[in-house]
Image (cartoon, helix red, strand yellow):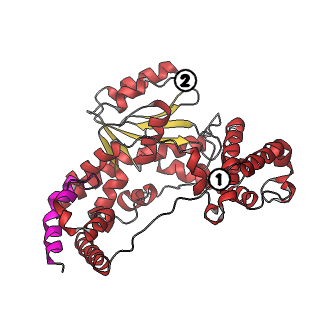
Amino acid sequence: MRNAIEAADLMTVSPPLPVEIVSRSAQLDVAVQEMAAGSQAIALDTESNSRHRYPEQLCLIQIATKQKVHLIDTISLKDIAPLKEVLEDDSIKKVVHGADYDIRCLDRHYGFRIRNLYDTSIAARFAGIAKFGLADLIEKLLGVTILKSERLQQADWGRRPLSAEALEYASTDVLHLFALREILDQRLQSLGRTAWVAEECARLEEVRYAAPDLETAYLRVKGAKELDGRGLAVLRSLFLFRDQESRRQSRPPFFVIPDTALITLAASPTANLSKFPGLGQTGLQRFGRGLQQAVREGLAAPPIERPLKLVKRPSHEQVDRLSSLKAWRASLSAALSLDPSLLWPTASLERLAKAPDTFDSELDCDDIRHWQRDSFASSLRAHLKSLP
């Protein structure tokens, strides 16, 4: 019953635009021509299957023009190179909501870049909107309620054929982006923050995918901080074994062996494997020998000692300065109805609290935006001078 209700709700909110599933090269060529032919803007989203496959796949790219929604089936299509030119065309605005993941995903799988980006989540934050999730924005600004099904969000988008419900869901993610952009643009213009958002989006365009470092990723497993040097060596060996096994099975690591099992086994490497929670009889049959070998290798390896972090405690003056600088930022935040973190980076305030005489050089730091310098540097300089 629940699924039927979800499907019905999704159907009622879709604008009357034709939806095309692009699964053949000839279709993609035509779709790209349609996107490039006079389109001033396209709306973009992607769907991946990180909860179901390892390494994850980019399964679907949704692109809407004012005339049509193209659902580009990247599982069926082996080559989507024609799309590169459209995404990197500076004359076509790319309207995306929460673009960070999409940018990294397109870079990781295809080396594509997105140029002339407009991120509606960034625009909403600078418009002073507290709830800037896509469904929240659509309801608040357009008066339309869409159902963001957690079941579909976590679905295996790599399975084919996709259900009608899944296709409707994927289409809905891009159908409303043009209308959102129009309303948000009006608000930003009235607030004088259009250039602020443009700079933030331009910075976001430069984001790139960075593969995790498997040689250090094991240290971020929950519970690793409680292990001694020997336990860390065993954990590292188990972590690398799990990664190898996950790739062999094409299944996410947490499906193969949960983190809790890795930590428990690293803490008690000589215990009986059959007694560890999260492994199960099937897991023991599949890779019990591999686990045992990983444990032996970890025990034979030198203990891993964490490097000591020598943290110099800040002086009372530094603490007081930082508190005052944050109060300065909070005052701006209240006056502008903006999240304080948007107005000036915390890391910069911490550096200034430690060395207030470095203000001029601080303005040249990479994390300081042009719009921040233009709008708030004078005020910040004056506040620093007023501090004891």
216 on left or right of 88:
right
Residue at screen point 48% across, 36% down:
108
Residue 153 position within the rendered picture, expressed as x and y whole percent measured from the top left: 57, 50
Where, quadrant-wise, is the N terminus in this rendering?
bottom right
Determine whether 316 is above or below 180 in the image: below
Q: Looking at the magenta stretch, what is its main secondary structure?
A: helix
Name the residue tied to disc 1.
3
Magenta-highlighted residues: 361-386
Occupied quadrant, residue 371: bottom left
Foreground residue, 221 or 255? Answer: 221
Determine whether 209 is above or below 194 in the image: above
The amino acid pointed to by label 1 is Asn
**Is residue 370 within the magenta segment?**
yes
Foreground residue, 191 or 384? Answer: 384
Name the residue tied to disc 2.
78
Residue at screen point 53% across, 22% down:
24
